[in-house]
Amino acid sequence: MIRAWNEEALDHRNALLYAMGVSPEDAQRPIIGIINAWNEMNPGHYPFKDVIEEIKEEIYRAGCLGLELPVSGICDGICSNTPGDRYTLPARDLVSAEVETVAELNMLEGMVLLATCDKVVPGMVMGALRVDIPAVMLTGGYMAAGKLDGRMLTLTHTKQAYAAYASGEMSREEYKEVVKNACPTPGACPFMGTANTMCAMAELLGLSPHGNASVRSQSKEWHGMARQAGAAIAQAVKEEKRPSKFITEKSFENVVSYMMATGGSTNSLLHIPAIANQIGIDILPEKFDQISREVPVISAIYPNHPSYTMEEFEQAGGICAVVKELLKAEKIHGEVEGMFGSIKEKAEKGENRNTDVIHSVAVPIHEHGGLAVLHGNIGTDSAIVKFSAVEPEAWTFAGPARCYDSQDEAWQAMIRDEIQPGDVVVIRYEGPKGSPGMPHMETFMAAVLGKGMGTKVALVSDGRFSGATGGLAIGHVSPEAYEGGPIALIQDGDMIRIDIENRTLYAEVTEEEFQERRKKWSLVQKPASGWLDLYRKTCTSAHRGACMFWK
């Protein structure tokens, strides 16, 4: 058994289980918690109701007892560009605390984690690593892409369409048709955003079945993976196979390599450091940049490609095919083990069926990985850009600053055509402590793209982005404005220079001038209470995962 039982505690628990129909014989089985983020507000988590009984059957068949325990399951897309968006990143840490609590309070022997979306997957993994009992994860699969008049649609296109509607470039009827057709089925949004990046992260850490991160939600294959998860957790409990026995620094390096090869979400630079830190491993932005220089982009789906989605990715071979290509080129650690076998075994299951969607390392889409970490006199710790979603002509950019202290101010200015081609928009006080909560700057960038200015306007912000954000968007600027970082001292008209290939971000402002401005600087204090106030007081910088639970 995983735990050293206190007989009285066990009897007290069992007495309460009897009240719900559990027999004395079944109560003696190892109890495995099915930690479920299912709810009726989130299409990424909605399918899990269909597989609970299948998972329980496999667990019971193997001699254990599976009991369902709910935790929070939020969706970033629901609250985009609303005050609620401030809660999405802090929700990751909340979910991690929920997983830790239900596992320890209920004296679970193991866990099946059911999650799909941006913050819930990393939150559950953080909690599972802190508890360190046997754990597997089943992610929910991707939704179908929307279609309208022969073109592909996703949730992101609704935001671009709204910007076009608000500025008079699209009729209300056209806009509403985009909204109606953008998300046709349950599952994760069908692009290489944060959700699908994090699902891949869970699989590459060895927690999910082979191929789970690139399977269609509610498909026959997905249901089969649910049964695999149930059988695997029961076996892990018998073997006392904890995550700490197989998750190593090389596991996280594999995650980053895959992320670079597929142009994964910038939010990974918040989540992966926070997850690794739970078991004493340091994976900071500099590690991402190092691997980015070594691992090229070999697969591009939206927003890194105009029309390919997760459907084309799965048909081409999905995650296993990418791993196969990386292993052939010695760009991933094949010996790393997991709950379902090694990375080498995952590669053996892969077949690259479409080299337009998944390239070889020898013939990449970009010579370097999809993300870059920038440094300079604005982001003295770091700043992040997903340059696989930036047209190469914009990799070098210079222009005058236009400064705003909130995304809404900048968005309104964009809609009013106050922002001109060549401008570098600075949105600050949207970092982990400043907002607080570090909301998405996706809505502003959607307006930029909706106006066809993706290569003509740059954004520099201490906020973050959706994994689906395209265009020249630089975020996670650390230190943030709230902490007195240099981004707080930028003024309208300052010339800002961006050089992605050389990894630099500079304002043409001398250190002496910055010091003079600092004497006159006053903090912009945005109101926060309750959970957000606690998050502001306890979270780290974006450079260290914007995390409340940093060791």
Image (tube, rainbow, N blue to C red):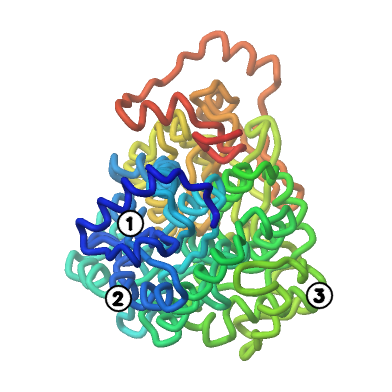
User: In the image, 53: left or right of 470?
Assistant: left
Q: Residue furthest bottom?
A: 353
Mark 3, Cα crowd under 10 Å, few <14 / some 14-19 / many 20+, is few
Q: Position of residue 348 (x, y in %)?
A: 70, 84
Give residue 30's quadrant in the image: bottom left
Residue 466 position within the rendered picture, expressed as x and y whole percent measured from the top left: 45, 54
- Placement of 309 over or under 192, stated as above or below: below
Location of residue 278 in the rendering, given as x and y in whole percent from the top left corner: 59, 43
Residue 520 relative to residue 514: left or right: left
Mark 2 is on which residue type?
Answer: Asp
> Where does the image place residue 62, in percent across and percent down from the top left?
47, 76
C-alpha separation, residue under disc 2 versus residue under disc 1: 15 Å
Q: Residues within 10 Å of mark 1 (few under 14, many from 20)?
A: some
Q: Quadrant of the C terminus?
A: top right
Which residue is pictured at 73% across the width and 76% down the height? 344
Indicate left or right for 270 with 44 as reference: right
Q: Looking at the image, is mark 2 or mark 1 earlier in the sequence?
A: 2
In the rendered structure, which amino acid carries the disc numbered 1?
A: Leu
Residue for badge 3: 329
Query: Which residue position is annotated with label 2?
Result: 50
Query: To which residue does mark 1 refer?
Result: 69
Q: Quadrant of residue 243?
A: bottom right
Most distant residue in the top direction: 519
Q: Earlier in the sequence, mark 3 or mark 2?
A: 2
Q: Point out the frontmost of discs 2 and 1.
A: 1
Q: Is residue 190 left or right of residue 247?
A: left
Q: Disc 2 on helix, strand or loop? A: helix
